[in-house]
Amino acid sequence: MRKIILHSVWSSIFVIVIMVSLSLLPLVAGAPTHVDMDKVVKKPKHENRLPSAPINFKFDDGYLIWSAGPSRNDKILQCKILQWQIFRGMSPDKTEPYVNITYPGETYGGTVFVYKDWYVMYGHWEWYNWTFVPLYYYYQIRAVNKFGYSDFAYAFGAIGANGYHPPFEYAPNEPRNLTAISGVHKTTLTWDAPLIWNVSDELSNAADYYWIYRGTDAASLTWTCRANGLSFIDFNVTDGVTYYYQVVGLNSICSGYRSVIVDATPTGT
């Protein structure tokens, strides 16, 4: 019995010695007892791999022109640009995705990038003073790679802003009999097509579609949407707020004369 007890004691002492020896091994071998974070090689974060924003972005009579931002070390970070994304709108605070261009797209000399926007209008004539008003478009562009996208670059402009404009004979007349009807959580607009005359055997001043302008101040209306018919229902309203509306017809040549301004106040019941 006494031999068994002594054997157990010596076995326990042996296990303890082994454990202590293992715990002291790093100190004996000179290994560090903690991780020195300053010496750890860190992988670049995704923010450092995103492309730079395009530079020198401008609108020039229907053409969008820009250059790539400062390049990064593609061999290390692999942040090659894959695509350009262009947004467009009729006001600077309301742009929507417009076109995606696979990199590089059309270029001049490989460093200046160009996109021709074929779907822009010249503007409209003010019938009461025979003044041509250019129609401004607002653009945003950003570069895209496999890690994400860059910040936006901004540009705006109008074709015809340099003095040229289409003859007024092509401009659609103002939409007639515009009416705004207040409803429950909505406003309904209806109007009649503009009067038409034939400019030539091939062309007329007929309106192909319409743009709706809206605002809470009659003196400050902004573009809201396109309508293909002779009516529009505005659900994006706040009950009890008075909204002012104006409609203009457009064709393949230019936009036309604006309608009268009407107003309506949607109700909650």
Image: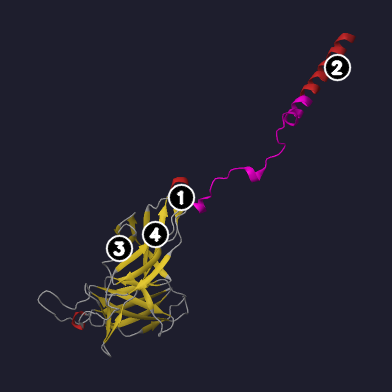
Front label number (2 vs 3): 3
Q: Amino acid at mark 3?
A: Tyr
Q: Amino acid at mark 1?
A: Asn
In the picture of the structure, the residue carrying the numbered disc 1 is 73
Q: Are marks 3 and 4 in contact (CB under 8 Å)?
A: no
Q: Which mark is residue 9?
A: 2
Q: Amino acid at mark 2?
A: Val
Q: Are marks 2 and 3 in contact (CB under 8 Å)?
A: no
- Characterize the local packing of mark 4: few (<14), some (14-19) or many (20 or more) Cα atoms within 10 angstroms: many
**In the image as oriented, which residue stretches furthest toward the bottom?**
129
- Characterize the local packing of mark 3: few (<14), some (14-19) or many (20 or more) Cα atoms within 10 angstroms: some
Q: SS at mark 2? A: helix
How far, Cα to Cα, is label 2 from label 4? 77 Å
Q: Earlier in the sequence, mark 2 or mark 4?
A: 2
How far, Cα to Cα, is label 2 from label 3? 87 Å
Q: Quadrant of residue 39?
A: top right
Q: Quadrant of residue 130?
A: bottom left
- Characterize the local packing of mark 1: few (<14), some (14-19) or many (20 or more) Cα atoms within 10 angstroms: few
Q: Can residue 86 be seen in the rendering of this structure? A: yes
In the picture of the structure, the residue carrying the numbered disc 4 is 68
Q: Is residue 229 above or below residue 32?
A: below
Q: SS at mark 3? A: strand
Q: Which mark is residue 115?
A: 3
